[in-house]
Amino acid sequence: MLSEPRSGRLAAWGNALLAGLVSPDDAVLAIVGEDAVHRVEGLPGESAPVGLTLALGRLRTLGVTGLRVALPAPGHPLGLSGPPEFNARALEAEEAVVCHGAAFGLVPEVYEAGPEGDVHVEVVWHVLPVRQAPPADVPSLGEAERELAEALREATEVLSKLDVAGSGPVAEAAIDAYRARAERGREVLAPGYPPRAVRVLELAQRVGLLVSLAYGNGHGGAVSSAEMRARTEALRPVERTSRRAQVAAYNAYVEERERGAL
C-alpha cells in the first residue's frame, strides 16, 4: 500500500481546513495529489460540478464540522452507516467520505484520460445523502494499534511460510519505494491529528503493503490450490485489520474532537 486512499486525503486535509489549520490552497493541493483535477457534483445549491475549494466552503456553511472515512469491502461495510444507496456506491468505489454535522457523504468516481504514456486522472466526488448513525466496525486508535501489532506478526509469518515475501524485483522495488517515502519524512496526516493516529496509519500502511505484495507477487511458494486458498484465508483478516486501522486513524480527528481531546 504505497499511497493513501483519496478519501483519506480528502478527510484529513478537509478536517485541517475546517479547523483553520491550513489554507484552502494548501488543502486542495494535498487532496488532489498527483491527480489532474478534483470536482464535486451534487452539492446542494449547485447545478453543476464545482471545484474543491468552493465545495469545502459550502459544506462548512451547510453545517459540516468534520469528515470521516469509510473503506468498505464485500461483506464488510467498514465506516458506513447507510442508507443502502450510499453504501452500494461506496462499496463499488471501495471508499467514501462521510460528513459529521450534516447528513452528506461523498463517493469518488475516477476517470483516466489522455494517450498512452501521458494519462492523467480526474476525480468527481458525488455528494449523496447519508444516515447519521455510528459508523460500522470502526475501532478506537488503541484497539487498532493492538490489532496491527498482531497482524504484522501474522502477515510476516504467512509470507515467510508461503515464500511470497519480499522476493523478486517487483516486490523489492515496492519495498524500496515505501522506505524512500518514509525517509523523506512525508506528512502522513494533515496538521491537527494526534501523534498516535500518525503512528497507527504508518503501521497500517506497512501491513497493507505486505498484503498487497503477497497478492500481487504471483503464487510464490503457494503452488497448489490448497496452499493458495490457505494464503488467501490467512491474509484476509490481516487485510481487514489494516483497513480498520486506517479508518480509525483518519477518523481520529473527529472522534477526539467529539470527546473534547482536541
Image: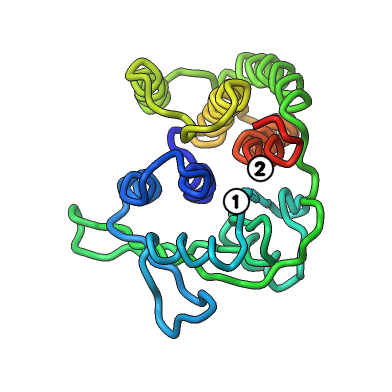
Question: Residue 79 at what x, y percent from top left?
Answer: 71, 50
Q: Nearer the viewer, residue 174 or 82?
A: 82
Residue that numbered label 1 is attached to: 67
Give the SS element for disc 1. Answer: strand
* Residue drawn at point x = 73 percent, y = 27 percent: 144
135 above or below 85?
above
Question: Residue 147 at what x, y percent from top left?
Answer: 75, 23
Question: Residue 163 at what x, y percent from top left?
Answer: 57, 18
Q: Nearer the viewer, residue 136 or 103?
A: 103
Residue extending farthest bottom: 47
Q: Are marks 1 and 2 in contact (CB under 8 Å)?
A: yes
Q: The C terminus is located in which quarter?
A: top right
Q: Amino acid at mark 1?
A: Leu
Residue that numbered label 2 is attached to: 254
Q: Is residue 138 left or right of residue 201?
A: right
Q: To which quarter of the image does residue 97 belong? A: bottom right
Between disc 1 and disc 2, whose residue precedes?
1
